[in-house]
Image: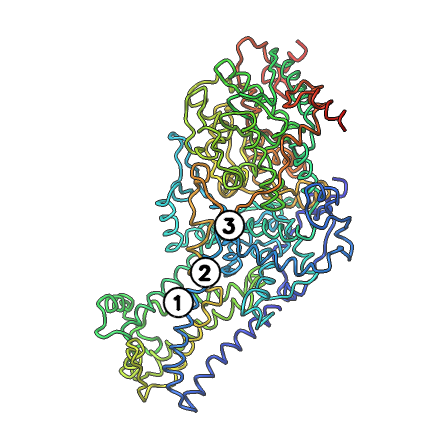
């Protein structure tokens, strides 16, 4: 974060465009370092067969567009208008009432007027009007229409990668206009010209080849989990072996690969492993897959087609292994895709069975056709049936708040289950202010593939509303742990906290579950999964 | 285009709209054109236009089930779900839509950003802000009541509900200040509310810098048009009285498709009628189509059922994927070495390699 301005610098935000500003259409886009992400590298586009792979730099004047780029965009636009009622409607019915304007975390954190959701949509609408409406064709500028030029295209690119598809605007829009939908389709359009960012293109290529975004190959995936097995043994004295690609298992487990790769997600991953081991004797028969080793889906940040291509692995692998149903890890956009797209993309999975918990016998009727349930649902059900022996006091050193992920909140409505689990495993839980949680939750500022390093300023700006709410409970209640159910959150919130609210750490929920879980025959636990002393055990570290 | 130009352009357009019938009827006496032909043409454009637009929207499918969930999903019996904001069936969707259409529920959620810096540290609050919601409700409902009240001109005998509405609307028995007691008719509450609301909706576009930034001529034009419509109507009622019997004769004629063009109606009436004609003819081509669009909005009119009721995408097509076999072929040796199960043994790999 060497080049990222200091918090006090970034905090100087002006949300009020000057009255005598030229109209927004006359202003050429200025692509700023710290805000934009690096361009996609050709090899990553080539690997998955995306069009027009090339070496290019957003700061250059020449973006090496194909000769007929305008036709490609216009045809692509028309094609999508015919395929998506959402796009057609959202292009036509906005009244620019401004209700969405100050709801976007990027606008709140940057003051850039083109980050008001309505404006970001207008960037596309203005071109739509020119090409697809009578008024726009006749009255041009007076009807809010403008020609698609290279500058306009660059503006699209710049601002479509300053939207995290969090849908907060759509909650407040009186017509339900959803900027996420416009961003998704807008990104599809610019991807027709090979204009992706590498932070999305590389994970997509990796995921296609190795099964996960991080490009972890099968033997390494196994290695990593074995390393966690050793760690867990150190802490609990019990060896909790996992198994991989096992045919005939009852359940396939799929989680974001971020959980396997980097702290603090790894602790969440250890949490899953411990829970599975705990339930083994009670009849849990579960396997991991090195092929379907990614729950997340950066394809979804590229195009619907790419999302479908990457998502296909889950059903394909569950069919090959002959499992009955699929259990999914803690993740945000993964669950938007699983909830709102998977069955439509790649279903029906008629080779699977309606999920039933082997421990409690609970039928998960809300997952009757997708056959995939969220591990938080699974664990909440276990707790409700008292199937877990828990000692929440082991988390007494934590004062916890919960960050709802945008996707599970506004693309699913997954609000109470995580809170139920948290309250079962820790004694100190405090909610952030109501305008910043549940369906009104604020994005981490780095979702939808924007969790790169080069755009750190953008991320810190976009995360400001979330950080501000954490700061509030940090100061009021001494909250020191921000819990979440999203792998991207776990990867990015630590940076955000360090920047805006030092003294607050980040955890997945199953890390706290595993800390509280009491195993038969375990050695006296003196540390948590992070190898930090448990409350009251500070002196026993070397015992 | 900056906001000054947008406002100038839109107000100029509305001035032209006012001048056309003024000259057309006042100077050229084209009563049939302005009293019969244009209103019919406008009505036809309005109805045909709306139907065509809605059909055009519906021709595009809804490939994915993408409701914006604004409450707890339906999951366990022991977790209370929110059947309206996160509907699990048609019933919930219908209620959600009724709230959305009749009470502007989403707009009611509105808050206002309050951004401050205290010693360089940002402090963000989200303040109460219901004025936009209040103005929007007042505007739409006043407009509705005014339209319904106008039925006393179109229908003979006047339906009971119209008279009732008229009485309720005029219950304050106010005179038109400052001319109270000069024999002028009572003032309708909705006239005042409509003008107040529309003025506020215009002012916020001009005074709030964010609104000023996003507003287009297409936002000012309908507002100016509606202000002109209301103003001409009120002038007619309170100041330049027109021959109501003749107006009614014309209006009923239009409605019964046996149009007549009575003499002696003041030009102000034709101005009012022409503004209305322009407004409704403009309607299907403009953002005013949000009236119909809200009903089709896929983030609002779908239930959150995609995990238990399969949603079919009519244009779903097969895509290229990276199959397990391709994956294993690339990593087989490493998998075997790591002790991971494989479909084809090491020997079969060796054989293939030998053949090559």
The residue tagged 1 is B194
Q: Nearer the viewer, mark 2 or mark 1?
A: 2
Quadrant in which the N terminus of chain A is drawn? top right
Asked which secondary structure carries label 3, the reply is helix
Residue A313 screen position, x and y as percent: 59, 33
Whether labels 3 and 2 share one chain: no
Does residue A285 appear in this view?
yes
The residue tagged 2 is B290
Quadrant in the picture for residue B183? bottom left
Asked which secondary structure carries label 2, the reply is helix
Whether labels 1 and 3 share one chain: no
* Front residue (pair B191, A365): A365
Q: Residue at x 50, y 53 (%)?
A: A86
Quadrant in the picture for residue B181? bottom left
B87 left or right of A198 in image? left
Residue B292 screen position, x and y as percent: 42, 60
Does residue A484 appear in this view?
no
Q: How is the image coloured?
A: rainbow
Quadrant in which the C terminus of chain A is drawn? top right
The residue tagged 3 is A170
Label placed on residue A14: none
Which callout, 2 or 1, points at the residue further toward the start of the chain?
Answer: 1
The chain containing the residue under callout 2 comes to B
Q: Residue at x 65, y 55 (%)?
A: A156
Residue A52 screen position, x and y as percent: 72, 50
Asked which secondary structure carries label 1, the reply is helix
What is the C-alpha distance between the residues marked 3 and 2? 15 Å
Q: Nearer the viewer, mark 1 or mark 3?
A: 3
What is the C-alpha distance between the residues marked 2 and 1? 19 Å
* Front residue (pair B235, B321): B321
């Amino acid at each position: 974060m060497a080049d990222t301005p200091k918090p006090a610098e970034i905090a100087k935000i002006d949300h009020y465009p000057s009255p005598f500003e030229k109209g927004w259409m006359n202003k050429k886009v200025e692509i700023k370092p710290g805000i934009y992400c690096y361009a996609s590298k050709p090899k990553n586009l080539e690997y998955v067969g995306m069009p027009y792979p090339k070496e290019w730099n957003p700061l250059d004047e020449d973006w090496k567009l194909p000769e007929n780029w305008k036709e490609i965009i216009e045809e692509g636009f028309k094609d999508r208008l015919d395929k998506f009622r959402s796009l057609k409607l959202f292009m036509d019915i906005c009244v620019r009432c401004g209700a969405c304007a100050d709801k976007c975390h990027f606008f709140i954190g940057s003051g850039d007027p083109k980050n008001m959701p309505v404006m970001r949509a207008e960037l596309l609408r203005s071109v739509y009007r020119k090409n697809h409406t009578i008024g726009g064709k006749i009255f041009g500028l007076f009807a809010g229409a403008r020609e698609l030029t290279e500058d306009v295209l660059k503006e699209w690119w710049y601002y479509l990668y300053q939207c995290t598809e969090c849908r907060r605007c759509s909650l407040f829009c009186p017509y339900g206009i959803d900027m996420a939908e416009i961003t998704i389709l807008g990104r599809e359009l610019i991807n027709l010209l090979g204009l992706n960012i590498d932070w999305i293109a590389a994970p997509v290529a990796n995921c296609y080849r190795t099964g996960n975004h991080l490009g972890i190959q099968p033997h390494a995936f196994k290695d990593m989990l074995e390393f966690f097995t050793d760690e867990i043994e150190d802490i609990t004295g019990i060896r909790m072996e996992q198994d991989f690609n096992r045919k005939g298992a009852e359940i396939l487990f799929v989680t974001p690969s971020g959980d396997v790769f980097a702290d603090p997600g790894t602790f969440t991953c250890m949490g899953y492993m411990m829970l599975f081991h705990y339930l083994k004797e009670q009849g849990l028969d579960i396997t991991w897959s090195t092929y379907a080793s990614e729950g997340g889906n950066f394809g979804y940040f590229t195009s619907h087609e790419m999302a479908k291509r990457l998502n296909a692995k889950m059903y394909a692998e569950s069919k090959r292994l002959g499992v009955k149903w699929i259990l999914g890890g803690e993740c945000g956009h993964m669950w938007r895709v699983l909830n709102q797209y998977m069955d439509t993309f790649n279903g029906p999975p008629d080779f699977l069975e309606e999920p039933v918990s082997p421990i409690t016998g609970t039928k998960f009727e809300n997952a009757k056709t997708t056959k995939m349930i969220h591990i938080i649902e699974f664990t909440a059900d276990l707790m409700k049936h008292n199937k877990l022996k828990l000692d929440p006091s082991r988390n007494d050193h934590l004062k916890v708040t919960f960050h709802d992920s945008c996707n599970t909140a506004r693309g699913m409505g997954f609000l109470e289950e995580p809170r139920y689990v948290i309250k079962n495993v820790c004694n100190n839980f405090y909610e952030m202010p109501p305008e910043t949680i549940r369906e009104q939750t604020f994005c981490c500022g780095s979702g939808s593939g924007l969790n790169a390093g080069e755009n750190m300023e953008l991320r810190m700006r976009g995360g400001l509303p979330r950080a501000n709410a954490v700061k509030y409970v940090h100061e009021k209640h001494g909250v020191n742990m921000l819990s979440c159910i999203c792998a991207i959150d776990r990867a990015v919130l630590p940076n955000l906290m360090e920047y805006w609210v030092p003294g607050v750490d980040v955890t997945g929920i199953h890390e706290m579950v595993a800390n509280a879980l009491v195993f038969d025959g375990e050695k006296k636990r003196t540390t948590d999964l992070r190898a930090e002393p448990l409350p009251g055990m500070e002196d026993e570290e070397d015992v | 285009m900056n906001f000054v130009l947008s406002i100038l352009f839109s107000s100029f357009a509305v001035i032209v709209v006012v001048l056309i019938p003024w000259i057309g009827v006042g100077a050229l006496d084209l009563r049939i054109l302005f009293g019969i032909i244009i209103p019919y043409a406008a009505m036809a454009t309005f109805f045909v236009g709306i139907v065509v637009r809605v059909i055009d929207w519906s021709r595009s499918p809804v490939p994915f089930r993408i409701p914006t969930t604004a409450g707890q999903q339906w999951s366990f019996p022991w977790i209370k779900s929110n059947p309206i904001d996160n509907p699990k069936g048609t019933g919930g969707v219908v209620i959600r839509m009724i709230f959305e259409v009749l009470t502007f529920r989403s707009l009611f959620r509105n808050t206002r950003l309050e951004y401050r810096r205290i010693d360089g540290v940002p402090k963000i609050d989200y303040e109460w802000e219901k004025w936009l919601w209040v103005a929007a409700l007042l505007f739409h409902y006043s407009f509705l009541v005014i339209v319904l009240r106008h039925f006393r001109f179109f229908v003979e005998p006047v339906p009971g509900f119209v008279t009732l509405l008229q009485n309720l609307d005029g219950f304050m028995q106010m005179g038109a200040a400052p001319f109270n007691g000069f024999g002028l008719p009572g003032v309708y509450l909705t006239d005042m509310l409509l003008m107040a609301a529309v003025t506020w909706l215009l002012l916020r576009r001009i005074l709030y810098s964010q609104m000023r930034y996003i507003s287009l001529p297409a936002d000012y034009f309908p507002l100016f048009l509606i202000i002109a419509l209301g103003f001409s109507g009120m002038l007619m009622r309170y100041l330049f009285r027109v021959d109501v019997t003749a107006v009614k004769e014309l209006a009923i004629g239009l409605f019964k498709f046996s149009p007549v063009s009575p003499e002696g109606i003041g030009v102000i009436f034709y101005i009012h009628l022409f503004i209305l004609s322009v407004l409704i003819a403009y309607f299907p081509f403009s953002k005013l189509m949000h009236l119909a669009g809200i009903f089709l909005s896929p983030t609002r009119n779908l239930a959150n059922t995609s995990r238990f009721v399969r949603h079919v995408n009519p244009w779903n097509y097969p895509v290229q994927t990276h199959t397990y076999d391709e994956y294993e072929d690339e990593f087989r040796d490493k998998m075997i070495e790591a002790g991971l199960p494989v479909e084809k043994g090491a020997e079969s790999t060796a054989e293939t390699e030998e053949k090559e």
